[in-house]
Amino acid sequence: MAETTHGIGGLTFDPRKREMPAEIGVALALVLIVAVFEALGWLLMNDSFLFNTRDNVDGLFNVARLKIIILQVSIIGIIAIGVTQVIITGGIDLSSGSVVGATAMIAMSFAQAGEIYGNPNDRAVFFEQGLVDLPIIVPLIVGLACGVVAGGINGLLVGYTRIPPFIATLGMMVTARGVAKWWTKGQPVSFPTDSYAAIGAGMMPVVIFGLIAILFGLALKFTVYGKHTYAIGSSEDAARMSGIKVARHKVLVYTIAGLLAAVAAIVLSSKNLTAQAGMGIMYELDAIAMAVIGGVSLTGGRGSITGTVLGAMIFGVIISGFTFLKLDAYYQEMVKGAIIVGAVVLDQWRQRRKASKVEK
Amino acid sequence: MTDIVLKTEGLTKHYGGVHALDDADFEIRQGEHVAIMGDNGAGKSTFVRQITAVEQRTQGKIWFDGDYVEFDGPLEAREAGIETVFQTLALADDLNVPDNLFLGRELVKLKLGPFSILDYKAMRESTLSGLEKTGVKIPNIGNAIRNMSGGQRQCVAIARTATFHSKLTIMDEPTAALGVQETAQVENIIRTLKEQNESLILISHNMRQVMDLMDRIVVFRRGRIVANLRKEDTHGEDVVAYITGAKTQDDYAGAA
């Protein structure tokens, strides 16, 4: 027994057994998947997946593809940032997709232009009330408020009643979808003002996704909020006995998740220049899948924003890869499903291996 | 007397019709190590739960550190300086050692409500000095508690008390689930606390441990204190007689 590795009573600690962060495994998986598509590209398509092969374009990488990879996952990625935090507390949020739908409808109806090509836009939801061409701040505040209300209700239900998060947010999922349909009796809401349309234009979704990821990545790592989020997911009893106000904290976490779903709704409706009652269907599951692939444990206490962002990238690479190989979208979903299950199996295997190491 | 750290008078707790604790008079002095013994259901844990305000007492008075106290909850008791190592340890598995030590009372660099910025460096340093004080050596305190053995976890839970310079430490059966080596380590920590003149209440079923480490033994039976014995004046069989009800001290005759 070396002096540096034992405490009194024969306890052994080995500093070399420092854990490898789960994110490194996810990053490796991302690299591996990219490599597979690169190889398949040369085999099947005689073209590169990642690198630029066009003579009329400059640069080493296929920048257009890289942009699409991240752009197509950034809106669900925003939701996944919120969902990640909920899952870390040991909860789940099934309502985000429906909250996207409801928020998009409501926010968009306050963001409509009064005139289209010189004609009055008399199909605008609040045309008769004269609520058209409103300043950008109005739909923003209305939209974010929708998210806060939905998330807040989720949080209150989970924190202060004994309803499991699955049921509470399932209720919100159904209710919010109902609100989305009821708002205009199923009619789509279109023609936003130029300033609203600018929010999700071009690469803006990526920028917003990046900023939100950094903000909450830092919050989880360096603030009391983050520490308590992990503590609650790790052991709710320990958190309570340590004096953490568990219910209040859950309300905060679910409210943030709702808020981020609303941000996604605003970006999405702005990008599409329209809002429809069916918007965001299945988004909640994609967001959960991104988190899970990124190493966030559904039992709570483990995971990170970095992991979820990497999980989102894996999603993006798979979608782009299948398009690149000219394979049907059906295969995409089958493979996505397999990857989700594979990620969880791998994670559990990793945990078990770690546990058995300690017992030696 | 100012060196009495904790004193209770007529402490009573009823759960509906069940008298879990009746009329308990207890005191502990600075630096004194007192064992609480008794059969299952004798009221030991109930007594601790009233002192630490995990539950609110039905009747009775508590003085702590010279002042009459009525704590609203466990956090308030802890802030006043009563540190408890619960049987369940109350550790968060996925957090590392400093995170667990400071759970619920994190040190912050910048106060921003729930988003206050953590002061990792200060917490790490206090953790190291706390571990040093208890004689626990953990070279890598940055690892998650999940991957530690029962004894290591117990040590972390105990080190929590040392880090915060508590005035009174309460341990509820700290070695009940531990192996021989690990028990030895916990006992070493208790000895260290004794050398540092820290007060300790230990709930234990382990007669050898109590006889080795404690100054005084208070025996509970059916919700009442039935004996208050100085270690020098008693021996194992004697204590067992009080626990089982074969004997009751004259002072507590009414309790039998």
Image (cartoon, coloured by chain):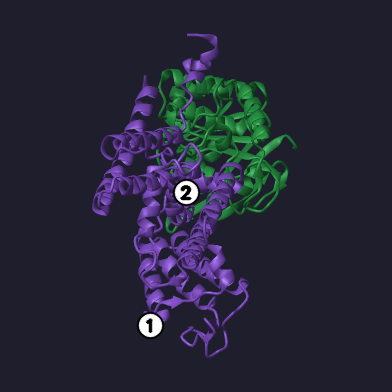
Label 2 close to label 1 by CB (< 8 Å): no
Tell me residue A208's x, y (percent). Answer: 55, 55
Residue type of the residue flagged with mark 1: Lys
Depicted A287 relative to depicted B185: above or below = below
In the figure, what tint was chain B given? green
Element type at mark 1: loop
In the displayed structure, does residue A11 sit left or right of residue A182? right
Label 2 to label 1: alpha-carbon separation: 36 Å
Tell me residue A197's x, y (percent). Answer: 54, 68
In this view of the protein, can residue A298 be seen by the observer?
no
User: Hey, which quadrant is residue A314 in on the image?
Assistant: top left
Q: Quickly name the residue at label 2.
A: A67
Between A255 and B102, the one lying in front of the other is: A255
Which chain is home to disc 2? A
Which chain is represented by purple in the image? A
Which labelled disc corresponds to residue A185? 1
Between A134 and B165, the one lying in front of the other is: A134
Between B185 and B206, the one lying in front of the other is: B185
**Residue at figure coordinates x 53%, y 30% from the top left:** B156
Depicted A144 relative to depicted B238: above or below = below
Nearer to us of marks 2 and 1 is 2
N-terminal-most mark, 2 or 1: 2
User: Hey, which quadrant is residue A222 in on the image?
Assistant: top right
Residue type of the residue flagged with mark 2: Lys
Image quarter of the C terminus of chain A: top left
| Pointer 1 local density, CA inside 10 Å: few below 14, some 14–19, many at least 20 | few
| Pointer 2 local density, CA inside 10 Å: few below 14, some 14–19, many at least 20 | few
